[in-house]
Image (cartoon, rainbow, N blue to C red):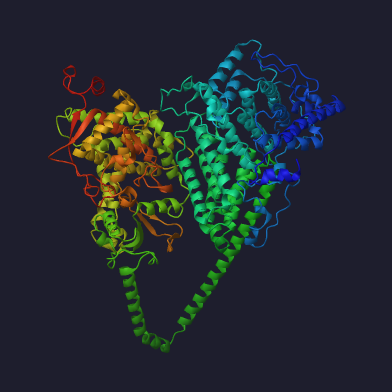
Amino acid sequence: MSPTKEKIFLDDDRVIASYPVTYVRSLEAKVKSLEKEFNSLRSATGRELDSRAELINPDTSDINIALGRQETEANSTNLLYEPSPTQLPLLQSSPSFVEELKILSFEATADRHLGSSSGLSFAKLTQTVLRRLNPDKADFSFAHFEPEGGIWPQLNLPSSTSDLLDSTLFSGFRDPFMCYPSMLDGFSPTAPTEPISLPEQQVSLEGSHVDQLIRFYFAHSHTLYPIVHRQEFNNILEHVRADPQFTLSDEHESMMYYKKALEHFEGALDYGYMAALEVLLLQVSYSFFNQLGPNTWTLVGLGARMAIGLGMHASSTYEGLPADVSEKRKRLFFSVYMMDRVVSIALGRPFAINEDDIDVTPFAVEDDSDVGAQIDLPENSFKPSILTVPLHILELRQIASNITTSVYSHRMSASLNAEQREEVSNSLHQRLLNWRRNMPFPLPNTDAAVPHLNSSWYDFNYYLHVAMLYRPSPLFPTLPEPRVKVLAEAASMSIRQVSNMHRQRCLAYNWLNLLSIFTATLSLIYATTAQPDNLISVLRDKGAVADLDLTIELFDKLSVKFPVAGKICRMVEQISTRYKEMMEVNEADRRKGQLMMSTLLNLTRSFQSLGHKGVIEEAFSLVPVLATTLALLACYVAYNVAFGTDIPHIKGLPQMPGAVPIFGHLLRLGEDHASTCENWWRKGNPSTFQIKLGNTRAVVFNSYEDIRRLLIGYQNAVIDRPKLYTFHGLISSTALGRPALRSYYPMFDLESYCILRDLHKDSRNGEVEISVRPYIQRYALNTTLTLCYGIRMDAVYDDLLREILHVGSAISLLRSASENTQDYVPIMRYFPNNEKSRRSKDLRERRDAYLNLLLDKVREQIKRGTDKPCISAAILKNEETKLSGVEVSSICLSLVSGGFETIPGTLTSTIGSLATKEGQAWQDRAYEDIKRYYPDVREAWASCYAEEKIPYINAIIREAGRYYTVSSMSLPRKTVTEVNWNGAIIPPKTMILVNAQAGNHDVRHFGDDAGHFDPERWLESLNPPTEKEISGVGHLSFGLGSRGCSGQYIAQRLLYAALVRLLSSYKIVASEEEPPNTDYVEYNQFKTALVAIPKDFKVKLIPRDTPSKDYRGFGLTPWILQVFL
């Protein structure tokens, strides 16, 4: 391959390689040529190699895998079957061989256009590369090590910080990872100057040690790349142990293990197909801890080439295969895929597998024990599946792949305008946020300190990929200030997380993490230096210097294994020193300024002490002037109190009329802010406008399209807290994400059953009209209490349950803007006998009392060892978090408050709409749809908490969320950067109000009947009911973008389970004396509440089946009676 062609292949993503058959034939000829060169080298050197080569180059003679296969006769002219590799001086191979091998590896690995029948000898090439992958000699117990020589010259920082950005330091900054060619040299191990000898005393490997190694493999490697089927492995292991000829007495030290492993690997490679792919991927797993990063890429490419040749990327290949065979192959293929993405991105190389070629779905979440000819659900659904981890990591690799192809591609970026580029970035950031929120919870518990089974690993990778997204790239060649700030915080947080892992002794000290830390470090240096106007304040306030010091410690430790890390360490030390010098100079200047001011004040006081009568008389003559000045000052203060706002009037944005001094629009908005704003918009006024809430200026968004554009297109600008979430946000989103649903099935089952159990009992099986709201309140509250504290209350009118509900609802009333005027009119805070302040204090004390009670119960259960899986127990027992009881209560409070009001409000109001005359038809259609999917309704009861497959029920839930917007005016946000809204510049720190009620009833989006409850708007057809294809939930009640509700998946499943069980058991009819109010505004009995509280109503429950005297006339089918009784 010519140098020109090699450069195009490696560096230019706009060129797609395509080779003729003659070129393929030339590759085959090269293989034969290399074999001859090997043979000539062997003949020339004979057996004069020292013991070092004998150890490093594994013996491949007498290979005999105990699987019943006959040994292949070695060909004397074939390199791969030559006995005794001690005859092959690989370490002394000629430069021409090394260069040819490199070229051959590139050509064979990355050109996926060659086809499966190209005739290229991949097995030969693989074994040649395997022999060059020598085990590392570096010890993993890190002592101080000072590497010699240099890969980079001593770094000379420019005097100007802005010039630093133009230096060669950032020459690779527009790649996903900054991997300089000179860094790869630092991965190569230095050959020892003295022969390596094993200790005289032989160390045997006992069975317990074997078991320990196996447990570590399945805890560490298997949860990253599920290559080996665990049950099959254990069965074979037991079979081998039963063989009396089996012994490990001659295998000791890593060199010997490696040698033995390669003997078996090369034998398995001869089998081809899946066995060859398995051993190749196991070798890749090993090479991640080897110092030769580029060789890992070569091996991954070979594995990818083999997988594509076997058709493992195509869904048609899996048709007709048993589930267990299909799952094994999917695990292998997606392991290759993940390895390809990790290594190729880290080394700046092209992918071996094209994303567009893959049409097979990922492997299932079930563990090996649950996968046979068919896949079965495990009996213990509380036990997390080990495969949730690699599946979640697979999603991260897919996001990283999309970042690489969308952000770092000149070809993709060239055709996009500014708005499209922002949309691409926001979409990828949203996927990263969802990935972090949906982290497997709880993580599998292992004895070993496995990095990716630690929450810090997920934080580290989240922040690392955010930095990868926000660095200068072909998509954003120059960064605006908001992107620079996000980059700085992402880089800083990734460094802190990896430092935490290092100190917790759960960091993998491999070349991949070295590149990751190096990338994060350069990102931090760039983002810090790219703000020269306020560089000192950035250094002082953001802790960049302290973060760089953390990286110095990390690089110093990594330098034991990688000499290049020592060079990077010294480079970062120079930059950190320069930053510290700048801060010291600034501090000295500040102190000089303070000294000058102090001197001036002392001189002034000295002059005043020399005062005489003339000066005093002159001072009296100034009294009228001072009085006038004070009067003007008082007028200015009064004007500001009456008309001033924290943010000046926003030019280009209309303002609602009717503002009055001091209160602004608070009086006009009245009790129901959302409806007032919605009504003013519907009179033909703009959807987006500004209002004054006392001394606070706010911008209100009303239409569905404007709200969606704001929350999706400008999500970075309206995050209203640091872009990169703290532990508080992460633990809640992790526990409430979609992957966690499965572990909550028993809770959904129990709590939805209790609704029907007590409704059946208290209504006397439908004879007495009943209010459903108390039962649904307990349903929602018990769910959150179980999730947070591992406790529940069985009685509907339990004292503690009612206290939590009462206090929570009362606090909700106080939090709304219409009830909390003193937040917007500061002068009211100083009025005597402030009733709201007194009530707030009383409610806070009552709330703290029951929070402490709940937390004390968890602590007591932990002491007794009887605690149940829950968030508070997980945090209290986790020494990593170091959170106080107050902090744990704060986290749980957010979850409890977020669910026990919204879910009852939505579900209760929905039942009210279904109970109306019009709603009877919806109930009947829903019941028929339940029976369509589950002819035996008992199946619906058994499945409703595990799946959401009934279209009509899903349509009712969507319409319930849209029509009954229980949080009509979403919690206020604040802009963190400027927002250019149709030419009007909304400045930072401006309050943003999202009128979700108005957006959910926008006739331009939902049609003229947006003001009516109609679940069938979400259906494509009625015969049979078929759902429309909709992105997301289709409404605004859960929010959108990065601040969307993290508990929406649990909320939807709770609504689904309750409705399926209720509608399959009873027909609901509204009471004539106390009917429900179904108006989407008037149904709320407290307009000032932050979350709507539906007006009370009663319903009559009519059993679905005719009464049967065999079951005491209860009117329920036998299976329901068995459940209830």
Above or below residue 137? Residue 213 is above
Quick one: 753 or 210, which is closer to the camera?
753
Left or right: 219, with 1125 as reference point: right
Position in image of residue 324 (x %, y %): 51, 22
- Quarter occupied by residue 623: bottom left
Q: Quadrant of the C terminus?
A: top left
Residue lying at the far bottom in this picture: please name it: 614
Position in image of residue 544 (x %, y %): 56, 53
Quick one: 720 or 561, which is closer to the camera?
720
Left or right: 354, with 814 as reference point: right
**What residue lies at 65% left-to-right and 53% top-to-bottom?**
170
Position in image of residue 330 (x %, y %): 54, 28
- Count the marks: 0
Above or below residue 514? Residue 767 is above
Position in image of residue 653 (x %, y %): 38, 64
Residue lying at the far right in this picture: please name it: 44
- Quarter occupied by residue 160: bottom right
